[in-house]
């Protein structure tokens, strides 16, 4: 396949990195980067962290300066997203009617917030936190708020809770599940992080469902849970997860299954269409399953890998997944993925809040979850670079010193 015009739908971390990596790999054809938003593409992680602080600065959000796109001859189309794909003609139609032909189409459409469907969700003061506009609204609301209710105890919800605490606000977190970050970390990490937040003043309501949000004069006043408890609030932030933005792919007949289905080269069921980032479900040799990840690392590494393929060097995607979250004084870092519960080993100092959990499946190390333990995290990424390369016996032989174990893996 000769590639002379790459059209990228979505200018988040994946789309912007792909544009950069294509040029770095020597691609000389046209690149058209199409986005829903008006303005420069921006970083997502700070939206629930530093940006929400009193000193948060929107000027620090852009992923690249405007000159970046001009210097690399990348056409950045702002506020005019792809609304349809004609695969037979290899053309996309934008929202204002422009038709753009492609030799390769890359879907980097990301994810969209899962909606909370309860009465009162549209009241003033009830917010979500997915894009820069949402973050600006939440930040403005935090300037005026005294009592904050966060719905959802995932990464985003707990990062926001930490930001609200830093401002001296009263914070309650309501979570349907039985523990914090239940989908992302093991019970030991959940318990430690919960304790760290509670020590700072957060109140948790686990196993509770929000049934109604009440307001006065059109503005939020109270959050009601299924046990009848009323939680006073003048700001509510909903963080109940996201869904892959795979609607465009489904509309044009590509295979989707909680994401756009791709192969190990990130290619869809159409050989001229690819998908990367949060929207893509790809075969992972680290899990042995079709996997969809929501992380900047995955988006960026997808883009770098695909750039090689599109410039004539077909490359399978096999990067070690890793994640991170800053929640006040607590920094969580995760390398690898554990889909089921299994034996664990704790290293470091739990009492001082600087430790890691090594997670095993069938005696093979599959994941390392760290709290304020960055050196172990870096070593863990090296350990997990080759799935199945390190087992419990090898780690026991070096007293679970992950740095020494990583050097053993490198030597082999």
Image (spheres, rainbow, N blue to C red):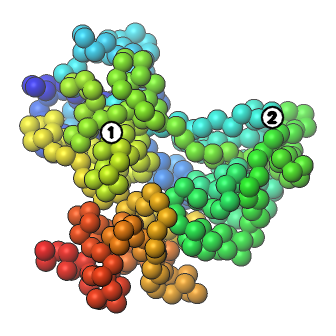
- Residue at 26% across, 66% down: 388
Compared with 305, 273 (above or below) is above
Give the quarter of the image for residue 400.
bottom left
* Cβ–Cβ under 8 Å for marks 2 and 1: no
Q: Which mark is residue 384?
A: none
Where does the N terminus fall, quadrant-wise?
A: top left
Horizontally, is 41 left or right of 87 in the view?
A: right
Callout 1: SS: loop
Horizontally, is 184 left or right of 318 in the view?
A: right
- Regarding residue 12, the answer to whether it shows in the image is no
Give the quarter of the image for residue 92.
top left
- Residue at 18% across, 22% down: 103
Residue holding disc 2: 120
Residue holding disc 1: 276
Residue nearest the viewer, comparing 223 with 366: 366
Compared with 266, 286 (above or below) is below
- Of mark 2 and mark 1, the one earlier in the sequence is 2
Disc 1 residue crowd, few under 14, some 14–19, many 20+, Cα 10 Å: many
Instruction: Please state the horizontal and vertical placement of residue 167, each as a whole percent of the image.
Output: 70, 63
Compared with 162, 31 (above or below) is above
């Amino acid at each position: 396949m000769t590639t002379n015009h790459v059209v990228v739908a979505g200018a988040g971390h994946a789309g912007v990195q792909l544009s950069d990596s294509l040029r770095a790999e020597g691609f000389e054809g046209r690149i058209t980067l199409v986005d829903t938003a008006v303005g420069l593409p921006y970083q997502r992680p700070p939206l629930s962290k530093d940006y929400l602080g009193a000193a948060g600065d929107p000027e620090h959000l852009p992923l690249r300066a405007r000159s970046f796109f001009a210097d690399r001859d990348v056409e950045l189309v702002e506020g005019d997203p792809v609304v349809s794909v004609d695969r037979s003609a290899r053309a996309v139609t934008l929202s204002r009617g422009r038709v753009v032909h492609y030799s390769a189409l890359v879907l980097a459409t990301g994810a969209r917030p899962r909606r909370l469907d309860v009465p009162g969700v549209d009241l003033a003061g009830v917010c979500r936190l997915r894009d820069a506009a949402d973050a600006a609204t939440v930040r403005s609301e935090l300037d005026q708020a005294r009592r904050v209710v966060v719905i959802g105890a995932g990464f985003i919800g707990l990062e926001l809770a930490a930001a609200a605490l830093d401002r001296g606000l009263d914070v309650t977190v309501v979570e349907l599940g039985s523990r914090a970050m239940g989908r992302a970390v093991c019970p030991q990490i959940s318990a430690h992080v919960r304790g760290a937040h509670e020590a700072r003043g957060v109140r948790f309501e686990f196993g509770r469902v929000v049934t109604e949000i009440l307001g006065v004069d059109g503005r939020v006043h109270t959050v009601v849970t299924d046990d009848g408890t009323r939680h006073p609030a003048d700001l509510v932030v909903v963080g109940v997860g996201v869904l892959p933005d795979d609607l465009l792919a489904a509309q044009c007949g590509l295979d989707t299954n909680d994401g756009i289905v791709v192969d190990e080269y990130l290619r869809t069921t159409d050989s001229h269409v690819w998908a990367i980032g949060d929207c893509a479900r790809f075969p992972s040799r680290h899990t042995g399953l079709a996997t969809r990840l929501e992380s900047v690392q995955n988006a960026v590494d997808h883009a770098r890998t695909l750039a090689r393929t599109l410039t004539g060097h077909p490359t399978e995607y096999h990067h070690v997944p890793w994640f991170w979250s800053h929640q006040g004084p607590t920094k969580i870092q995760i390398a690898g993925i554990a889909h089921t519960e299994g034996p664990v080993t704790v290293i470091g100092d739990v009492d001082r809040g600087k430790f890691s959990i090594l997670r095993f499946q069938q005696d093979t190390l599959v994941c390392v979850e760290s709290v304020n333990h960055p050196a172990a995290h870096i070593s863990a990424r090296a350990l997990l670079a080759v799935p199945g390369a390190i087992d419990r016996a090898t780690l026991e032989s070096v007293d679970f010193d992950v740095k020494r174990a990583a050097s053993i893996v490198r030597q082999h």
